Every structure is written in structure tokens, then in C-alpha cells.
Amino acid sequence: MTYVVTENCIKCKYMDCVEVCPVDCFYVGENMLVIHPDECIDCGVCEPECPAEAILPDSDDKATPWLEKNSEFAKVWPNITRKGPAPDDADAWKDKPGKAALFSPEPGKP
């Protein structure tokens, strides 16, 4: 099992999860984070830290469509090991559904 960042992270990117990850398996994109599934040790400490409830175990059906994106983009986006500032409008996007179309494949800045 691994944990997966889902569309709830898009345009929120709070990064509280990054601070607690013991193996630094988060990677940063322009408008969301992903978890490298081969690096995640399944400890689960990141899941309760996410204010947007964007992190799910891969056994959750809601995570399935995002598992491949996490794997693909963790290979090309930069690793992030410290929490940075959330976007100014993160709170406005936090509970909005249907953000998948807003996903950006562009890398972020660690």
C-alpha cells in the first residue's frame, strides 16, 4: 500500500504533509503535490495533516485515478522536504469539487 495525493490538493497545496513525512517522498508541481509510490513507507502520518483531505491510501477507490499521476509526476517534479507557503487563495479552493481539469503538469519550486 502507498498513499496518494488526489485532486483535493489542486490549487490548495498547503504542504503540511511535507513537514511530517519521514522519508521525504513528496514532489511539487505548479499547483499540487504528489507522493512517489516507490518511496512511500505507508506510515500514514501525512494523511491527517492535510487540511484539504487530499491524501488517501491507494486502497481507497477515490485514489485509484490519481495513483498513476502520482507515480508519473514524482519522477519529473522536484522533491520537496520543507513546507512552503500555500497559495494566497488556497482557502477559497479548499472545498471545491471537480478540480481535476485544473491540474497543471508543470513542475513547482521546492
Image (cartoon, grey):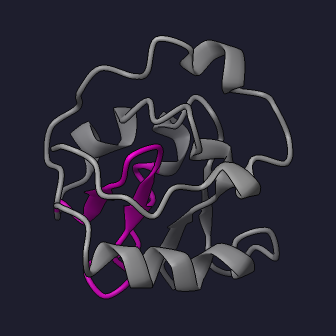
Question: Could you tell whether 49 is left or right of 18 in the image?
Answer: right
Q: Position of residue 92 (x, y in %)?
A: 69, 14
Question: Could you tell whether 81 is left or right of 16 in the image?
Answer: left
Above or below, comparing residue 60 to residue 100 in the picture: below
Residue at the image position 17 percent from the left and 64 percent from the top: 23
Extent of the magenta region: 24-46
Question: In front here: 84 or 30?
Answer: 30
Q: Is residue 108 visible?
A: yes
Residue at the image position 18 percent from the left and 51 percent from the top: 80
Above or below, comparing residue 31 to residue 91 in the picture: below
Question: Could you tell whether 28 is left or right of 86 in the image?
Answer: left
Residue at the image position 65 percent from the left and 41 percent from the top: 53
Question: In front here: 101 or 12?
Answer: 101
Question: In front here: 20 or 79?
Answer: 79
Quarter in which the C terminus is drawn: top left
Question: Could you tell whether 38 is left or right of 52 in the image?
Answer: left
Q: Position of residue 66 (x, y in %)?
A: 63, 73
Q: Position of residue 70 (x, y in %)?
A: 47, 74
